[in-house]
Image (tube, helix red, strand yellow):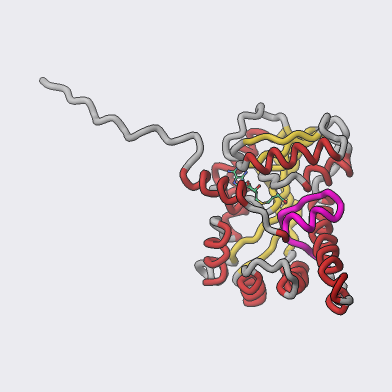
Amino acid sequence: MTTTTAPRAGAAAPAISHYQKSVAEYWNREKNPVNLRLGDVDGFYHHHYGVGDVDWSVLDAPQKSRDERIIAELHRLESAQADLLADHLGAVNPDDRLLDSGCGRGGGSLVAHKRFNCHVDGISISETQVAFATTQAKKHGVDDKVRFHLKNMLDTGFDTGSFRTIWNNESTMYVDLPSLFAEYARLLTRGGRYVTITGCYNDTYGLPSREVSTINAHYICDIHPRSAYFREMANNRLVPISVVDLTAATIPYWELRAQSSLCTGIEDAFLTAYKNGSFQYLLIAADRI
Ligand code: SAH
């Protein structure tokens, strides 16, 4: 009898996939004024959208101060979004350790530390973001408790049960949810809290609308259907305690941004998708059981 050996499988999967490499390159290169000039206002750099009513009088400001007024207003709205997320992080003590997953330039980590005086680890797949955020933590004088790392959120290497709270602020659309929530079920302590603010497509309408596909192509991301969040949380010991539909609250931010010098060209796709109901801006807070 002769035995044959099965051909060896192809090369082992790289530690960082081709897709993740392109996401990292996008964020390594990214220098949009809408991200940098807003953060310059007070040193809290956010890469997420805003919520709340707009002070429309900024559009009528004299030409020489108009841009500055609009920037300050957009920053106020994105800061309100970060505060809203922090409101859902639950009771956090100074000794607790929190994970800001997909941390961008680190503004959200600084917000959480300012509020709770807790330990925060921020992770990003972009090394320039990690370097930028680390400099910010030093500038704010909080680098003893707020640290940033170049890590893949699907495979963080952090110890099991080492976090009281984890959040994603507009970063779940870059990853596969079953893998993400399996990692969080491992990282969170029992009774820990998970919060996400995310855009998701409304699968009441079936597949993603054209505008949602345009947004995906613009950011190199893959917006998930709303149902996937609840299904994958349930599969991974994450039980929602609050679900807030922020769609109506974010539309004014986009309307102001569309009329500003900082618009990036994606504003119409967001506004159309939010208004036609095919896209939703959701906050979901869940407990790890
Ligand atoms: N949460 C931040 C930034 C949102 S932008 C804020 O609110 O300001 C999306 C972020 O997700 C970027 O920092 C990007 O580097 C990060 N990201 C995307 N895929 C990732 C992955 N697999 N692991 C870690 N971070 C990732």
Is 184 contained in the magenta span?
no
Is 42 contained in the magenta span?
yes
Q: Residue at x 57, y 55 (%)?
A: 228
Please provide percent x and percent y for residue 182. 59, 39
Please provide percent x and percent y for residue 252. 77, 72
Left or right? Give the position of 240 relative to 66. left
Q: Can the viewer see residue 236?
A: no
Left or right? Give the position of 36 relative to 180. right
Q: Quadrant of residue 275?
A: bottom right
Q: Quadrant of residue 244?
A: bottom right
**Residue farthest to the bottom?**
60
Q: Quadrant of residue 117?
A: top right
**Residue farthest to the front?**
64
Placement of the C terminus among the 4 image quadrants: top right
Looking at the rendering, the stretch of residues picked out in magenta corresponds to 34-52
Please provide percent x and percent y for residue 115. 89, 44
**Residue farthest to the top?**
1
Q: Residue at x 31, y 33 (%)?
A: 9
| Closest to the observer, 71 or 81 | 71
Name the main secondary structure of what is drawn in magenta. Answer: loop
Left or right? Give the position of 54 relative to 246. right
Left or right? Give the position of 129 relative to 98. left
Q: Can the viewer see residue 285?
A: yes
Figure disc tally: 0
Please provide percent x and percent y for residue 1. 10, 20
Up/down of 257 relative to 45, above or below: below
